[in-house]
Amino acid sequence: MSKRWPATLLLLLSSLLISTCNRPQISGDVSLPTDEDVVDCSYQALLEMFVENHVVTLSPGCVYEIPRAEFHAGGRSTCFAALPIISWSGYVIHGNGATLRRVPAPDNEAWQNDFRFIYIDHGGSLEIDNLTLEGGSIIGTDSPCDRQGGAILSNGSLTVRNSHFIGNYATAGGAISMQPLGSLVVENSTFEANSS
């Protein structure tokens, strides 16, 4: 004698089988993202890396969009740099393919939107590797600090390796400006659409 199943029970079993078959299978080799996997590419996160660190390793492939500069280079209120002033020797930035990019500032901060990324003071030294610096802008007409070095202005020692300078602008020295007492080494790096 055959057993008859109620129609509602058969319908429930069918829907369970279908949902199980359609569920994506996750093997042991696949990991789902967690909060710890989320990379912070904000300007604030970038600045925090420089707190008490002379050797900074950026997150691979991050694009750090910078709308304003926080630091006065050369002691001048109109001469901005996005990163802390390099005034000591031994600074290193491992870029890991990351990009520093200037982006438009909010209207109430537009006066702060013309800046270079890096200022190296007298006695400071910096090595950069595998980093892109894009869109820096210095348009002043006064001192060298106000008008030179769209991406970097250096009074110290600068070494650049495997890096890219794209679309930076300054009244003089669109990408990098070296002052008379500074020293510069550039290896395997590219310069594209920088102007002065």
Image: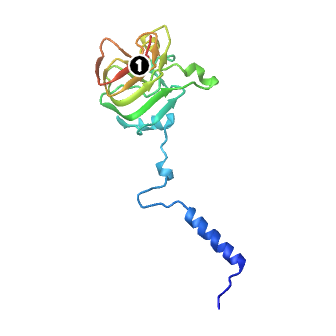
The residue indicated by pointer 1 is 192
Q: Which of 33 and 64 is in front in this view?
A: 33
Instruction: Give the answer, above or below, for where 186 lies relative to 29.
Output: above
* Left or right, residue 26 beside residue 93: right
Farthest front residue?
Answer: 1
Q: Which of 60 and 192 is in front in this view?
A: 192
Q: How is the image coloured?
A: rainbow
Residue 166 pos. (x, y %) = 43, 22
Residue 90: in sight, yes or no? yes
Residue 79: in sight, yes or no? no
The amino acid sitting under disc 1 is Glu
Farthest top residue?
Answer: 141
Instruction: Give the answer, above or below, for where 19 lies relative to 133.
Output: below
Instruction: Give the answer, above or below, for where 36 lies relative to 168.
Output: below
Q: Which of 32 and 49 is in front in this view?
A: 32
Disc 1, SS: strand
Instruction: Give the answer, above or below, for where 113 lies relative to 143.
Output: below
Name the quarter where the N terminus is drawn. bottom right
Which residue is at a point 63% across and 24% down the rendered structure image?
Answer: 108
Name the quarter where the C terminus is drawn. top left
Which picture quadrant has residue 118? top left
Q: How many marks?
A: 1
Residue 7 pos. (x, y %) = 71, 77
Which residue is at a point 48% across and 22% down the rendered structure image?
Answer: 135
Farthest bottom residue?
Answer: 1
* Left or right, residue 9 beside residue 157: right
Q: Nearer the viewer, residue 6 or 153?
A: 6
